[in-house]
Image (cartoon, grey):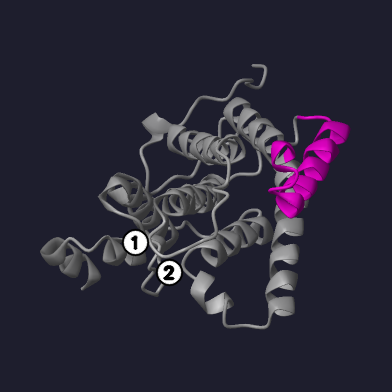
Amino acid sequence: MLLAYFAITGEVRALHAVATLNGWWDDDAGGWALVPGLAVIGGFQAWLLWVVLRMPPLTVHRGLRQALIAKALCDTVLRTVLMELPELLVMLVYLLLIAVITILLPGVFAEWPVPARNVVAALGLIGLLMSPPLGVVLIVWWGLMLTLQFSDGRWSTATLVAGLVAAGTHLAGLVVPMPPELLVGGDPHWAAYEVLLDASVVADALWMVLTARELTTLSPLEPVVTPHRSRSLAPRPAFRAAA
C-alpha cells in the first residue's frame, strides 16, 4: 500500500517506511536524491526475507545458524517490535546473540589453528559490542571472516559480496562524518547519513542469513548441500584432501 502511495504521490517518506521496515512515518526521510539508496536497501530487505523463507534445515551448527538468523531479524524485521520491549531485555538479547556468533563462528573453520580462531572471536566481541567507538576493529573482524570464508569453499560469491558490502558500509560510516547539526525535520545531511546507517544494518543482516544458509556441512571437503541455489556460484575449496 505504501509503495502504491509512493508511486502515485512521489512521497519519499512512504518509500523510506517500506525500505527500512520502520513501521512509522519518518519526517526526516529526505528528498528524491535518496531514492536510489532507499531502493537498494529495500532490495536487500526483500532478498533477506526470501533467503530466510527458503532456509535449508538447521541440522548442522544449529545453534550458530539460529543465532545468525535471529540477529539478522532483530536488526531488520523485528526492530520495531524490540523497541517496545524493556531496554534491559533487548540489550541482553543482543549480548547473547553477539556472544554466540562471535564465539562459535570462528570454530567452523577447523583447518585454522585454535589461537588464530580465538583472536578472531575476541576481535568480533570487541568490534560488535564497541562499534562505532571501535569501528575499525569491526572492519578488521569482517575482513578476517571474509578471508576465512573465501579460503574455505562453503560460501558462494553472493555471500562474499554481501559481506564486502557490509564491511564497506561500516567503513563509509567511519569516513563520512556525522552531520554536526541538530536533527530537524527534513535535514538532507541527516537523512543521507541515516540511509547509510540503514544500508549498513541491512547488509550486515543479509550477510548473516546467507552465511547461515550455506553452513550446511561440518567440513569444506564434504559435498555442499545447497538445494535452493546454483552450485556454480560457490567458490571451490582452497585445499583438497590428498588422494
Look at the picture and state if 119 lies above or below 30. Answer: above
Q: Secondary structure at mark 2?
A: loop
* Mark sitting on residue 22: 2
The reply to whether discs 2 and 1 touch (Cβ–Cβ < 8 Å) is yes
Q: Where residue 164 appears, x then y in whole percent?
A: 52, 34
The residue where tag 1 is placed is: 16
The CA distance from mark 2 to mark 1 is 8 Å
Check the picture and name the quadrant holding the N terminus. Answer: bottom left
Q: Check disc 2: other Cα within 10 Å, few if <14, some if 14-19, many if 20+.
A: some
Query: Which stretch appears magenta?
Result: 112-137
Q: Which residue is found at the position 83% from the left and 32% from the top?
A: 116
For residue 32, side relative to residue 71 (left or right): left
Q: Where residue 110 appears, x then y in whole percent?
A: 75, 36
Residue type at mark 2: give it. Answer: Asn
Q: Which residue is found at the position 41% from the left and 65% from the top?
A: 185
Camera sees residue 240: yes
